Image: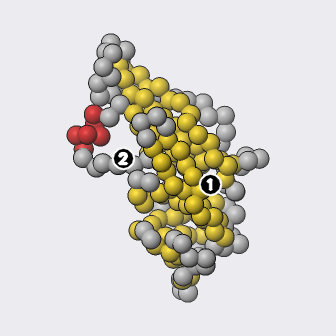
Amino acid sequence: MPFSKQFASYKISSVKVCPSLHRVTEQIRQETELTICTGSWDEPQNRISLWSVQRYTDDSESMPPFDYSSVNSELNVESIQDVNHCGDVSALDWPTPDILITVCNAGRVHVFKYQRDDESAQLQSLEDSQLSSRSLSAVCSSLPDVIVASDSGEVFVSRLGLDERNREFDKRDTCSING
């Protein structure tokens, strides 16, 4: 299996592909660019980073679909944007193509708006909420509801746009949900 690599110069704890605005399989295979998101940990200033992955083959100027089986195919990975993040990034979730939710070891949930046009892609902070005094380890969502788990087994259900969490599961054990 061929791989291409890019040195990020910091520790990466999470990586997710930014979802496409369309879900048609054939269209996705025809795309020549892929955007990925990474989260860092154990750094003086942690960050969320957006990366552009250009897929092309050396022998074509028209940039056909990337052929992973071809030895002449290459990936060009380029940094697009870094956004400072409070705490080690524990998990990333893309509930919709334009919303990114992150959780961290400081017990915080961050919500970002992802905007993309033909020229650029960027993340803009929408919400930053303290959910727990413990490290958060997993997140999943079905907007507007966000479910977060802590390392100590706490599970929180919250709704975007509210100032406090809606519900904490009362019966829990020391096992955490790992998503």
Residue type at the position of mark 2: Ser
Q: Is residue 156 above or below residue 116?
A: below
Which badge, 2 or 1, comes first in the chain's sequence?
2
Judge whether 137 appears above or below 169 on screen.
Answer: above
Residue 61 in the image: above or below residue 162: above
Q: What element does badge 1 sit on?
A: strand
Residue visible at 77% across and 47% down? 44
Report the mark closest to the observer, 2 or 1: 2
Residue at 33% across / 28% down in the picture? 66
* Amino acid under disc 1: Val
Where residue 143 sits: x, y (%)? 42, 68
35 versus 75 height, above or below = below
Kindly identify which numbered label has been placed on residue 20: 2
Q: Position of residue 102 (x, y in %)?
A: 56, 58
**Residue 49 visible to an observer of this rendering:** yes
Categorize mark 1 by other alpha carbons within 10 Å: few (<14), some (14-19), many (20+). Answer: many
Q: CA distance from mark 2 to mark 1?
A: 23 Å
* Residue 89 numbered tag: 1
Nearer-the-camera pick, 140 or 163:
163
Residue 123 percent across, percent down from the top left? 55, 49
